[in-house]
Amino acid sequence: MAKSFKVKLIKGLAGTTKDQRDTVRCLGLRKLQSEVVIKDNPANRGQIHKVQHLLQVVVEK
């Protein structure tokens, strides 16, 4: 299993549900093209899966 993910917001939040916007905010992404590194755990995997159409995810070891 990977130790962390590098997550980048590549699409805007216009037209998304409030739940999806909250999920992106909880991942630590604020603006378009912002990047964060998050730990690999089931909760973060679930959040990434929920908004995967808005993100670019790179697995880091």
Image (tube, rainbow, N blue to C red):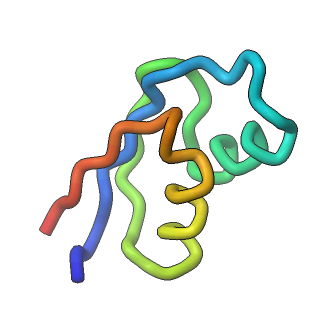
Instruction: Report the side of 50 relative to 16 (left or right).
Output: left
- The percent position of residue 5, horizontal first and vertical second, equals 31, 58
Can you say whether 25 is above or below 43 in the image? above
Instruction: Report the side of 16 relative to 24 (left or right).
Output: right
Question: How many numbered marks have been drawn onto this rendered protein structure?
Answer: 0
Q: Residue furthest left?
A: 61
Instruction: Report the side of 52 relative to 35 (left or right).
Output: right
Q: Which picture quadrant has residue 15?
A: top right
- The percent position of residue 46, horizontal first and vertical second, equals 57, 68
Q: For the C terminus, which image quadrant?
A: bottom left
Can you say whether 15 is above or below 5 in the image? above
What's the residue at 32%, 47% (across, down)?
Answer: 57
What's the residue at 68%, 23% (across, down)?
Answer: 13
Q: Nearer the viewer, residue 2 or 39?
A: 2
Can you say whether 52 is above or below 10 in the image? below
Q: Which picture quadrant has residue 21?
A: top right
